[in-house]
Amino acid sequence: MAASFAQRLLDWFDRCGRHDLPWQHPRNAYRVWLSEVMLQQTQVSTVIGYFERFVLAIPDLPALAAADPDRVLALWSGLGYYSRARNLHKAARICVERHGGDLPRDFDALLALPGIGRSTAGAILAQALELPFPILDGNVKRVLSRQLGLRDWPGQSDVERQLWEESEARLPRQRLADYTQALMDLGATVCKRQRPLCSECPVADACLAKQGNLQAEIPARKPRKTSPQRETIMLWITDNQGRTLLQRRPPSGIWGGLWSLPEASSTEDVDTFALRFGAVRADVALIRFQHVFSHFKLNVTVQRFHSARPIPRVNDAPSNAWFAQADLYGLGLPAPIRRLVENCQES
């Protein structure tokens, strides 16, 4: 069955697979790694533009290791899940220090790098080096769950263990890179969560979900939890030169390491912070928006202030700095803050 499954998938890939993705030309370990990390939690259509801009600016692993963290975060800005970018940068520096400036070819050494899990390590080794390692991203979980007729959520430890065993058992002896891409392509373009195209699937006759007309139920969705809501106040302070005051966020937590507008938890804190910069409230309406994270919703109120004098830095808060409009494009900014400060004009 394994050989039949792999061969039919490869035959389908030759006819219908995706052969023009930018990380396939050339397909090396750095480009595969970068694409795999970007594709975590993100659609291919979104990733393509980010990938092309990233490799144009930072074409290889030594360049990534040498890059300024702000440059890396700026190129990532808008993709979300910024720990991915921070881990890329950390891993690149480790590779320069310990692995001769390249990703290691050893599975355990890859797995030890920040941000590289079992599936990402397998994808790098299979796609860049043609080594027999399985993958198990979201698309593959869906394909295999339907093939096996598994009704439970694939994130359950016992189900995931079974899927890993199945993914490994179905590996072909040759064309590991193409097979790995074919498996991902099948899940992304044919075996979709909504309205799968079973009539176009090369392995539909062996699919237990199709046989039982259970495609809409398999795989089961992750049990939902109610997303809590948080509130914050942001201060948008500009000086008499039109510069914006930004504050670098702590390295961990949401938007870790990025520049953002200063935050306050109460009106009193807002006034105290603004007073330190000699800033007065601007006569404009408050700006309110909600940003949805994976595990909570953030309700933001933005208050506008203007300072009549530029202040380069505050001694007890060196993370504060003024930036001209032209400087914002090279900074790592959270997507909603970038849209706010780049596009909204002073009223």
Image (cartoon, grey):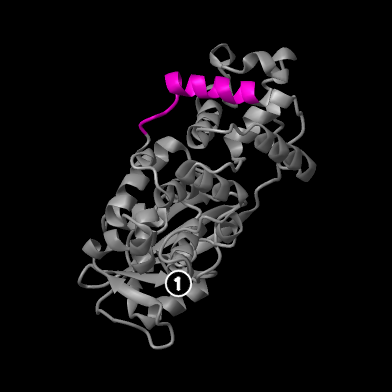
Q: Position of residue 14 (x, y in %)?
A: 44, 22
Q: Quadrant of residue 49?
A: top left
Residue 285: x percent and y percent? 37, 56
**Residue drawn at (39%, 60%) of the image:** 73
Residue at the farthest front position: 173
Q: Nearer the viewer, residue 259 or 117?
A: 117
Q: Nearer the viewer, residue 206 or 191?
A: 206
Q: Is 172 rendered above or below residue 286? A: above
* Residue 303 visible at all: yes
Which residue lies most toward the right here? 158
Q: Which residue is mark 1?
A: 97
Residue at (34, 73) in percent of width and height: 280
In the rendered structure, does residue 261 fall within the stretch colored magenta? no
Horizontal and vertical percent position of residue 268: 51, 75
Identify the image quadrant of the N terminus.
top right
Q: Residues within 10 Å of mark 1 (few under 14, many from 20)?
A: few
In the image, taking residue 131 as reference, residue 235 lies left or right, namely left
Of 117 and 248, the residue lying toward us: 117
Instruction: Determine whether, in the image, residue 239 is placed left or right of residue 169.
Output: left
Q: Is residue 332 visible?
A: no
Instruction: Report the span colored magenta.
Output: 3-20
> What x and y, as percent, mark residue 113?
55, 62
Q: Amino acid at mark 1?
A: Glu
Q: Residue at the location (30% across, 73% down)?
A: 322
